[in-house]
Image (cartoon, rainbow, N blue to C red):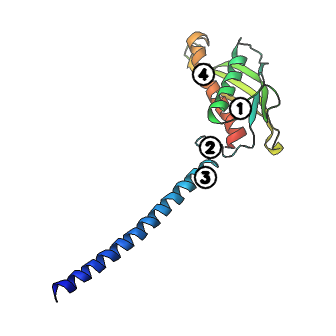
Amino acid sequence: MNWEYQKGLYIEKLSNMTFNKGITMKIFKLALVATVAFMLNSCSIYNFTGTGKIDAETFQVNFFQNNADIVEPGIERTFTIRLQELIQNQTNLSLTNTNGDLVYEGEIVEYRVTPMTATADQRAAQNRFTIAVNVRFTNKNKEADNFEKRFSFYHDFEGNGLPTGQILSTALEEIFERITQDIFNESLAKW
């Protein structure tokens, strides 16, 4: 074989490879664009809080009255604010004072300290601090989601302490975090 003939074969192979590489790159770019578009579109259906698509633009959290037998001043305001903040932080809904698409209302119905374990001399070794909240949820756009339900949680602490000061602050933080998350999950995440 002469050199010119071999050179022609190599040039032909090289041009075929370049042509195939161009088609491969075009297919790769098209697949990449389609994948990114699908992923971006999927984010409108699901988000990291698990709520999915919410058929509402506004929410309203009415003041939760403290109707428990024992009244701790200020916890009703703290609970109401915590619920508002949780919904604002985990959704794109706007908070409103009236005519919300989603309405949360209710009352604190239980505030109780119960001895859990006793020492040999009949003193409490551990106490349980429990708070329960009755919640009425209304979805003006989807009445099937409406509910009225009681949510409660507790915090255990040493029997020689009282639920005041730092013990009370820690307990309320833990209890309200759990109850508000449970309310959010029941009303919006549907867990």
Question: In the rendered image, is residue 127 in sight?
Answer: no
Tell me, yes or no, whether the two marked residues, 1 and 4, touch with CB atoms within 8 Å: no
**Residue that lies at the very extreme toward the front in this rendered image:** 4
Crowdedness of circle 3 by 10 Å Cα count: few (<14), some, many (20+)? Answer: few
Judged from the image, the secondary structure of the residue bearing numbered disc 2 is: loop
Q: Viewed as shown, does residue 141 lie left or right of 125?
A: right
Q: x, y percentage for residue 135?
A: 77, 30
Q: CA distance from mark 4 to mark 3?
A: 37 Å
The residue labelled by disc 1 is: 94
Q: In this rendering, is residue 178 above or below 124?
A: below
Mark closer to the observer (4, 3): 3
Crowdedness of circle 4 by 10 Å Cα count: few (<14), some, many (20+)? Answer: some
N-terminal-most mark, 4 or 3: 3
Tell me, yes or no, whether the two marked residues, 1 and 3, touch with CB atoms within 8 Å: no
Q: CA distance from mark 2 to mark 3?
A: 16 Å
Mark closer to the observer (2, 1): 1
Q: Which quadrant does the N terminus fall into?
A: bottom left
The residue labelled by disc 4 is: 173
Q: In this rendering, is residue 112 above or below 30?
A: above
Q: x, y percentage for residue 189?
A: 67, 42
N-terminal-most mark, 1 or 3: 3
Question: In the rendered image, is residue 39 in sight?
Answer: yes
In the image, what residue type sits under mark 3?
Answer: Asn
**Residue that lies at the very extreme toward the left in this rendered image:** 2
